[in-house]
């Protein structure tokens, strides 16, 4: 037991000085309370024992275990946020809070379930500069989700084959194309050539359809100079608004995300979360939840982050888990597993806060729904979300269409029209052949099992 890290009578943990965290903790052998103090020590100022070099001041920065639930193995810890780098640095917070602790012998299970940021702390972090509102304005699409695709195969197309697939999707009037998460500068598809070919494809599709289009380019790379080089190439090739920057936020890292957020505040920053499952899957005893990931992504300034498909698509993730993460991105105030998070200061001083925007408010971010979706699943996912404020990207769900990518895009748009007109897609398909073929191929939509709403 490290007593300095225990304060069960902490008067008001939400007094603004602390970032709060709730962990699920199963000790290897010791009791919950003493193991919790070991976790608090290792994730803030301490080590495995008291050191002689500690000072009164260093102790004022100790994380404090302020509540435990022995039955549920839950531990509440308050971190004085003065501990953290003054530079609004997410990687620094994570290095403390979900750093060494995951390797501690004393913990058999340790999962960060929820976090709470005090308004005083929020002010020091960037938050998103752009979000879905900027995409809507550019595309002139307001009353439906942004409809996108990921080019498949995931890798292996040449630059011109890749661009042809983009063109086909856009000419079927899809809005948004994204590079898949491993897209880089491969020998069979040199980056510069890919960018140039996409530009030609976009110009042609815009001219033919009369609608603006967006491409999200993966700029993740081995080093920041290369990332910036890729970003500059895109910036110098495309008109503002027509491109987004995708960063593989976990494999390239939070510093990559924050660098791009700060250098390019005018560009939609697309956070792909590949590898998150190692931390977030429910069956993993060690890690953090998708809610925690979404909250840190919003704090860092991601314009949008993948949040799964609430059980509708191919990836693991329950409706509740994915919806709770979506709400944390979209709402000014959202309920997490343990904390009610407000993304600004205003409601503390004004009861009518929801309708007032001030400079203190952290902008919303955007849920990106992807993974195993196809046109027949669009209604289910909109119903579950209870909002159209999201981007959806369907990869195989478009390119596997028996009549090709353009027909796949048309089927997505038709499924969306059916939704907007409140017509069953089977009925709408009677005079929309691309949708009919999609239903024939992917199967008729199943009734949603959940009806939670964002
Ligand atoms: C989807 C996808 C996305 C996943 C990531 C893929 O393709 O491109 O990376 O959605 O998962 O490669 O699987 P499909 P998540 O549409 O062909 O499934 O969004 O849950 O982070
Ligand atoms: Mg992908």
Image (tube, grey):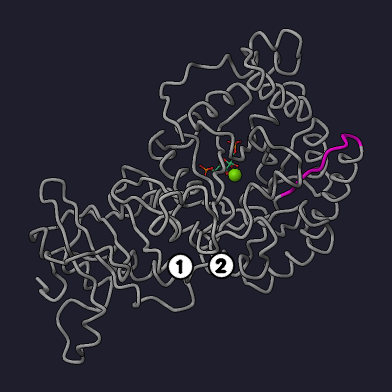
Tally of numbered tags: 2
Determine whether 260 is above or below 330 in the image.
below
| Residue 49 x/y as whole percent | 15, 79
The residue lying toward the viewer, choosing from 12 and 161, is 12
Q: Is residue 102 left or right of residue 421?
A: left
Q: Residue at x 58, y 40 (%)?
A: 390
Residue 367: which disc? none
Q: Could you tell me if the residues under marks 1 and 2 are in contact, i.e. CB atoms within 8 Å?
A: yes
Determine whether 391 is above or below 342 in the image.
above
Q: Which residue is mark 2?
A: 258
Residue 90: which disc? 1
Q: Quadrant of residue 311?
A: top left
| Residue 324 x/y as whole percent | 41, 42
Q: Which residues are magenta?
A: 208-215
| Residue 200 x/y as whole percent | 89, 48
Determine whether 323 is above or below 279 in the image.
above
Residue 40 in magenta stretch = no
State the SS at label 2: helix
Determine whether 82 is above or below 248 in the image.
below
């Amino acid at each position: 037991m490290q007593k300095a890290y225990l304060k069960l009578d902490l008067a008001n943990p939400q007094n603004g000085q602390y970032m709060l965290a709730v962990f699920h903790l199963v000790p290897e052998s010791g009791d919950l309370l003493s193991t919790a103090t070991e976790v608090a020590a290792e994730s803030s100022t301490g080590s495995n024992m008291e050191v002689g070099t500690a000072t009164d001041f260093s102790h004022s920065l100790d994380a404090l275990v302020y509540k435990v639930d022995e039955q549920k193995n839950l531990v509440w810890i308050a971190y004085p946020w003065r501990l953290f780098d003054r530079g609004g640095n997410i990687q620094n917070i994570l290095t403390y809070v979900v750093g060494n602790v995951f390797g501690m012998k004393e913990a058999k299970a340790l999962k960060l379930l929820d976090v709470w940021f005090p308004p005083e702390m929020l002010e020091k972090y960037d938050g998103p500069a752009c979000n879905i509102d900027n995409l809507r304005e550019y595309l002139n699409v307001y009353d439906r989700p942004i409809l996108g695709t990921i080019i498949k195969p995931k890798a292996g197309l040449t630059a011109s084959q890749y661009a042809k697939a983009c063109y086909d999707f856009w000419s079927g009037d899809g809005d948004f194309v994204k590079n898949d998460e491993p897209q880089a500068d491969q020998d069979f598809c040199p980056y510069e050539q890919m960018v140039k070919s996409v530009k030609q494809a976009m110009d042609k599709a815009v001219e033919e359809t009369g609608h603006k289009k967006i491409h999200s380019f993966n700029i993740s790379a081995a080093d920041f100079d290369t990332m910036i080089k890729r970003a500059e190439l895109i910036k110098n090739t495309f008109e503002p608004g027509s491109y987004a920057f995708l960063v593989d936020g976990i494999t390239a890292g939070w510093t990559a995300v924050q660098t791009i957020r700060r250098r390019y505040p005018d560009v939609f920053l697309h956070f792909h979360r590949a590898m998150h499952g190692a931390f977030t899957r429910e069956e993993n005893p060690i890690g953090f939840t998708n809610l925690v990931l979404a909250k840190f992504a919003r704090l860092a300034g991601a314009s949008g982050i993948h949040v799964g498909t609430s059980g509708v698509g191919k990836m693991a993730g329950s409706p509740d888990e994915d919806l709770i993460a979506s709400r944390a991105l979209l709402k000014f105030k959202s309920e997490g597993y343990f904390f009610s998070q407000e993304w600004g200061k205003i409601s503390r001083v004004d009861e009518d806060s929801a309708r007032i925007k001030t400079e203190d408010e952290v902008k919303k971010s955007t849920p990106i729904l992807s993974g195993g979706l196809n046109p027949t699943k669009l209604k289910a996912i909109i119903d579950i979300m209870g909002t159209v404020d999201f981007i959806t990207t369907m990869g195989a769900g478009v390119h596997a269409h028996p009549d090709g990518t353009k027909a796949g895009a048309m089927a997505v748009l038709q499924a969306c029209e059916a939704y907007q007109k409140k017509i069953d897609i089977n009925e709408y398909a009677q005079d929309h052949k691309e949708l009919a073929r999609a239903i024939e191929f992917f199967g008729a939509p199943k009734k949603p099992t959940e009806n939670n709403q964002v």
